[in-house]
Amino acid sequence: MKTTLRQSICVVTIFCGLAPLTSAIAHAADALPSWQEGKVKQSIVDFVAAVTTPGSPGFVAPVDRIAVFDNDGTLWAEQPMYFQLLFALDRIKVLAPQHPEWKTREPFASLLKGNVKGALAGGEPAIMQILATTHSGMTTDEFDQIVRDWLATAKHPKTGRLYTEMVYQPMLELLAYLRANGFKTFIVSGGGADFMRVFSERVYGIPPEQVVGSTGKLKFELRDGKPVLVKLAAIELVDDGPGKPVGIHQFIAQRPIAAFGNSDGDLQMLQWTAAGAGKTFCLYVHHDDAVREWAYDRNSSIGRLDKGLDQAQTHGWTVVSMKDDWKTIFPEVGAMPVATASSDGHK
Amino acid sequence: MKTTLRQSICVVTIFCGLAPLTSAIAHAADALPSWQEGKVKQSIVDFVAAVTTPGSPGFVAPVDRIAVFDNDGTLWAEQPMYFQLLFALDRIKVLAPQHPEWKTREPFASLLKGNVKGALAGGEPAIMQILATTHSGMTTDEFDQIVRDWLATAKHPKTGRLYTEMVYQPMLELLAYLRANGFKTFIVSGGGADFMRVFSERVYGIPPEQVVGSTGKLKFELRDGKPVLVKLAAIELVDDGPGKPVGIHQFIAQRPIAAFGNSDGDLQMLQWTAAGAGKTFCLYVHHDDAVREWAYDRNSSIGRLDKGLDQAQTHGWTVVSMKDDWKTIFPEVGAMPVATASSDGHK
């Protein structure tokens, strides 16, 4: 039966002449409905056609079709600040009753008075203290549940959406389109791996083992004979900037052929990808839509895109204008897969 | 057509009654020809049948069928010392002409006089110095090529085989058998990830991204505009003992349902696996065949199996006697896939 089917396909292919290529592109157009027609969308479709068409000089075997995506600002929004930091701030409030001493200790004191700006005025040390307090001292299973509960209920301060509804509809389509064309999709993000892995499969279709993120040190312990992994307040890998090619090497063990980012923190990942042998594709999402999202680039404190814009120009990388190239930014509320009580993905 | 095919299968299944289970076991017997019939082999086959039979209380969805294997002493031999250390010793000899100062400096001086025992008499500091000298200071691509070249030519001092021919035939069959039953197989080893990834796909059918090993720190650099990753003489993760569950969490992000080891360095990995919900399987390879391989366990300096033997007894883990349970130890020379000049796997 298989042979018969394949034979039928061959016959159809022969009779239709150029049909396979044409239909691949047509299919692509359907697969990316939230992308405006134009140069940007065409650059994606052309790349995918080149690496997936057998006999094309750019053809890449499916096993080597690795695509890496930054998360914050590339797959979901990152304003007014990284969502993981918003999680940490919420978490401080939950933990406060157990820590009366925080009433007089910064950055906690300001935060508990509702003065986020004051709390973060201490810069990186203050942020690191907030992250350490909220991301260590529990087991990996406990942390997983805490993040799961937060994602199920916390709402974005501006849009009132769940954070997992603040993902970019065109990027969801792009992820699915690449996978339909034999790509293996990975997240490579400065965000915490343990944080992102809670929702990556449900929201992006990216299983936890394909999420590369920043990691903290862990300690193996037997508690009443039961083994646990305890999250320590010490960083192992900062998967950002030059740490991204490092994370790619350590976790993916192959050089990607396509990389997607939105900030200078993604620059080295794009450089690493672009330097590979064969056809490669690099894309920056440019936040230039102040009406439907946020507009920021060269001077932003979060998600600064400065060197990257210049490099994109020099190397001919694709730059997506969120304003002009995306018909839709966010998915319809209620259209996203909903978190279940006990599990977001396979564990 | 699909429906018709599926319907046919259903009809066959109904008419044959218990046939599917029986044939699965029969197939298993064929898939493990180097394993002697008996309790050990049966424990493997029973576990696989339980987790793969739909409707069985132990059924596990394919996506959750994660199996982890130690490498040294579990998938390939580890005597007279870890093969990666033999690689390092060979490498010192190659590098010696560029380092005249080594003639009078330990551990190099002894080593270059052929006195390996003397060189290693300095214990861990001496070994770490040898490893740092041979595993850092080059790019990841350069290291990959050095390992590739060594594996293609270096021979084991006792057997005269290539090191990649010192793998255990029964374990190769077991890897393939598990994969044929929907398992995803991983290496979780104290060996260097960059070392093992050179041959894991060709020899074990395990792609590089499914190899978790010890890692060193890396530095991203642009050299004449070309990005490279330089291996530094600083350790990031020691993927041994309590480091194995840590490596599993960081890299695999799921708890395995089956774990295979041979030493106390694998104990925490087996404990972590055994503590999972649902049906799990833990197995120790016991080196008790002094004629065909080596015999060592409770007091060995390499691959000591002491606590693990006791724990296996307590928890009912499977212990493989290499002497009694394996018909064959190594594959026929020449039967292994050969390394090609340029590439061992997909890059």
Image (cartoon, coloured by chain):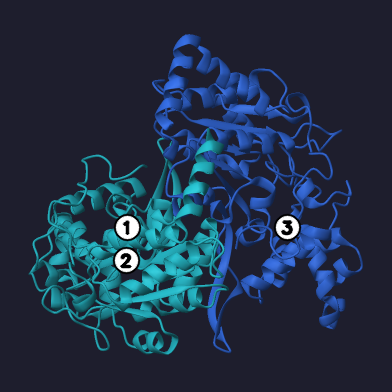
Chain colours: A blue, B cyan
Q: Which residue is mark 1?
A: B196
Disc 1: which chain?
Answer: B
Q: Amino acid type of disc 1?
A: Met
Image quarter where the C terminus of chain A lies is: bottom right
Q: Is disc 2 placed on a helix, strand or loop? A: loop
Within 10 Å of disc 1 (Cα), the crowding (few <14, some 14-19, many 20+) is many
Residue B328 horizontal/vertical position (percent)? 17, 67
The chain carrying label 3 is A
Snapshot quadrant of residue B74: bottom left
Disc 3 element: helix
Name the residue beneath numbered marker 3. A84
Q: Amino acid at mark 2?
A: Asn
Residue A204: x and y in percent read 66, 46
Relative to residue B221, is residue A125 drawn left or right? right
User: In the rendered picture of this protein, how many numbered marks are placed on residues?
Assistant: 3
The residue closer to the viewer here, B133 or B203, is B203
Q: Is residue B61 left or right of residue A84?
A: left
Mark 3 burial class by Cα count in 10 Å: few <14, some 14-19, many 20+: some
Residue found farthest to the front: B15
In the rendered image, which residue does mark 2 sit on? B71
Q: Are marks 1 and 3 on the same chain?
A: no
Can residue B174 be seen from the camera position used here?
A: yes
